[in-house]
Amino acid sequence: MDTFIAYLIPGIFSGAAYAIAASGLVLTYTTTRVFNIAHGAFGMVMSFIFWDFSQKQGLPVWLSLILVLGIVAPLTGFLIQRFIARGLGEAPVSVSLVVTVGLFVGLIGAAQAIWPPEPRFVPPLLADEMGNDKSFPVGETVVTAQQLITVLASIGVAVGLYLLLTRTRIGTAMRASVDNPELLKLYGGKPETVAALSWAIGISLAALGGILLVPVVGLDYYQLTLLVINAYAAAMVGRLKNLPLTFVGAMGLGIADSFALGYIPTDSVFADIRPVIPPLFLFAALVLLPQAQLRIGQVKGIVSAPVPSVPRMVVSGGVFLVVLLAVVSPMSEARLLLVGTAATYAMVMLSLVLLTGYGGHVSLAQLTFAGVGALAYAKLDSPNLYGLLMSALIAVAVGALVALPVLRLTGLYLALSTLAFGVLMDKVVFQNERAFGFGGALEAQRLSFFGNTVETTQAYVMVMGVFFVLVAIGILMLRRGVLGRLLVAMRDSPAACGTLGLDLRWARVGLFGLSAGVAGLAGALFAGLRGTIGAADFQYFNSLPLLLLAVVFGVTSVTGATLGGIGLMLLPVLSGSNPIAGGIVFLIIGFGAVFAGRDPNGLANLLFRLGRVLQARVLDRIDLNLPQLPSTTAFSRTKTPTREVSGGELFDDGYDEEPVPVGAGAASGGVAEPAGPPLAPTDQKGVQ
Amino acid sequence: MALLEVDDVVVQFGGVTAVNHATFEAEAGRVTGLIGPNGAGKTTCFNVISGLQRPTKGKVRFNGKTVTSVPVHRRSKRGMGRTFQRLEAFGSLSVRENVRVALDIHRGIAGVVKPAKADIDGLLERVGIRAYADERADSIPTGTARLLELARCLAGDPRLLLLDEPSSGLDETETDAFGDLLRDLAAEGRGILMVEHDMDLVMGVCDTIRVLDFGEVIAVGDPAAIRADKRVQQAYLGYSDDDEDDVAHPPEAGATDETLVIPVVPANQGATT
């Protein structure tokens, strides 16, 4: 009984802290439809600010609390809503998620730049001079003041939110905004004010959650940030809209976690289960979600990067290889490894071109699939084309397996389930001794072709280059063919594809599998390049910067993937031994993505445009395979459409190939059916 | 036995009953009109029939078999095709590619392995949008996009066509041609169920008409019977026989598609009767 209570109390404590953080997440999501992946990162940064105020500057704890929770956090929330989150809610999930992933990466970078790594200690709120917390005995065990404060704070948050949402005007407006912000505007409400307030409260709650957990977790960039997965899981129990259920979920998670610590013997096979509980919880909550309704009512057309003709592909690929050969010839071993790493990243990004660029799905576990490929390659220990193929196929199978249990999910939920999967794989498989081994030094052999092993790193990098070109051409060919058309059709209108007879769920499984296969191939080649690989090479949260750079450089084109691969490789190089510089690079990339992420064609598109301008100037004619501006004057009867609400405006950044969608009215939620007969059906009753 | 039977279907969204014990059928070789005021539940009925919406209660039978819990794509494989009131063209693809995708999907794996050599342009010609074949689907006029959706459906050679306001966005000549096309399609043995607001088209083309109001079927019959039905006049048509001429030629407001049209005519029109 005493053990029970001894583990129940910390369980309730962490549950309460998760509940506080999760309710902030739910609040911002329901009112603005932006799922803030960076919610935990905000909590982390706010905790650092709290440390700065209370420890470094020596302000009293209560004053620091008021400053952080009452001024810094709400102001941050307000500014984020005003300048970043605004309008994101209507965007496709590949845009809105990427932008908050950008915030995630940027905030971690900012924290590293402002507060360079050093041991920091945050005492509990009511600690004495020695940093020891007050505690009260409960039976055989004790409750610390911090635990008590946390539980009281969570009750306070619950009551406060309840009163705000039910008893105040602005709270009513918040609830109205959940259903229909446009309508709220018509009735004189101010959705923007509501959104700003939600974000202000949301970030404050993230801050509170972080500050309460810091004495237990420690002030760490990643630890605190990633605790948010607990909050995601709790929020998903409440289906991202129900606050009471979110609290229940958070408590359940906290207590389950604590009991796992208490009751599962450390030497049993289940000992590894504890770190897996939050992602499992998240995965389970997602699997139990009801079937996603197919959204109908929008004509979405996205101008993607032009697909080159076959001769052009082959010539470009050849030129690329020649340049690569020239570049790697004089290189040192260390640099060659870097080029090989860039090739790996670029190829993983190619898998995102397929999945996100063409298919419109977001995966937050792409590096995990690469890890599966690498692991399979090393374990199979047949370093030849057969082993490579098998590794890729195993990755295909795993990718399909991820999509299978969540067949019914789309968009955000699908992306979150990949995140949960990434965490699960990392904790259960990759970090397992039987996988990469202790310390992460699993050996892998270099690839051999028909008995001839590619010995030198130089030659191996060239082999990787050849594989990259082949995969790139394969993906471009696929885009030109039947499957590519299907992918675009599925992205543009899932509902129409369904009614035309396409089983969207299996198509999605296939797409995930194929994409994972490409990533797995990259991972396998990487294993051969490095010779030894470990869990640290494929940490799940590194899939986030990977996605980010892919989108920033252009997730719709091979050029974008190439540049993105080089960029991701350069990140740690640029930062070198100086974490501040590294933080700043992260910061620039992160916040760059916040703005660049709105155009999925990315920076690569700038190059294409430059190329077009040059071509137009130099050759005095426009190449035929460039996207044509859709004519808006082709019709006169239909009213010139206003810009489509969903997504359309987000690409309005001077990007001149912007299509003007038809059915603009049809797309925006608030517009009624076109009235055919000029007779109002209402008001007619009883007139005669 | 009718091709399609909707049997006592109820759809509730929270507390709102969108479809209330609706029962009707559509027969092969005939054009059935489904009319009613905005918000009467017509599109929801279509969603239930095509499988995008699960009914709270009731059954849908197609070709004699209950399909209520059959997923969307299987219904399509069994011969159902539909168009959307709010357009669902593949905006990033050309008009021709839109139809090609439909063909590929219809042919399944075979379509992926060996692309079809079907007469896509002939199909576009048939619905009258051949001229737009190479344009991106998000740049064509609304009416054309509706015809494109029809062409896309026809690529799958469906036995039942569900057309949701197919003529809005078409001008008078185009609507006439469209009416002829519908008769042809019905003559080929296809069943057509059409939600439509253009009363000239409905009365001219339909063999039989069902009128929905507040989710309920309030009248069934041929065009003449519907025109004469008092309840229908009250709920929807809003006129009695003596001022029919005014209404038969609706003012231009009805033709402006996709804009929020607030009809101002009916209030005094109702009062004159």
Image (cartoon, coloured by chain):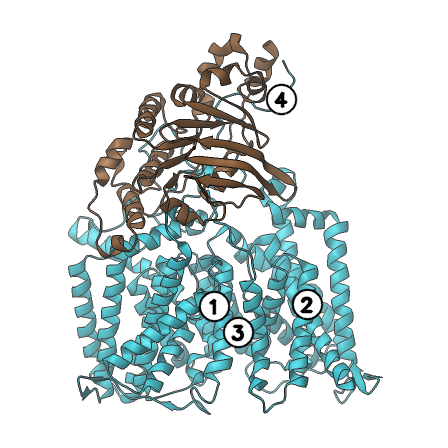
Letter of the chain shown cyan in the rendering: A
* Residue B165 to residue A439: above or below: above
Residue A530 showing in the rendered view:
yes
Chain B colour in the picture: brown
- Tell me residue B226's x, y (percent): 50, 18
* Residue A437 to residue A492: above or below: below
- Tell me residue A184's x, y (percent): 63, 42
Residue A108, numbered circle = 3
Tags 4 and 3 both on a single chain = yes
Label 3 neighbour load within 10 Å: few <14, some 14-19, many 20+: many
C-alpha distance separating marks 4 and 2: 50 Å
Q: Amino acid at mark 1?
A: Thr
Helix, strand or loop at label 4? It is loop
Q: In the rendered image, which residue does mark 1 sit on?
A: A418
Which corner quadrant holds the C terminus of chain A?
top right
Q: In terms of depth relative to the viewer, which is nearer, A122 or A147?
A: A147
Residue A683, numbered circle = 4
C-alpha distance separating marks 2 and 3: 23 Å
Q: Amino acid at mark 4?
A: Asp
Q: Amino acid at mark 2?
A: Ala
Q: In the rendered image, which residue does mark 2 sit on?
A: A19
Q: Amino acid at mark 3?
A: Ile
Q: Residue at x 44, y 65 (%)?
A: A403
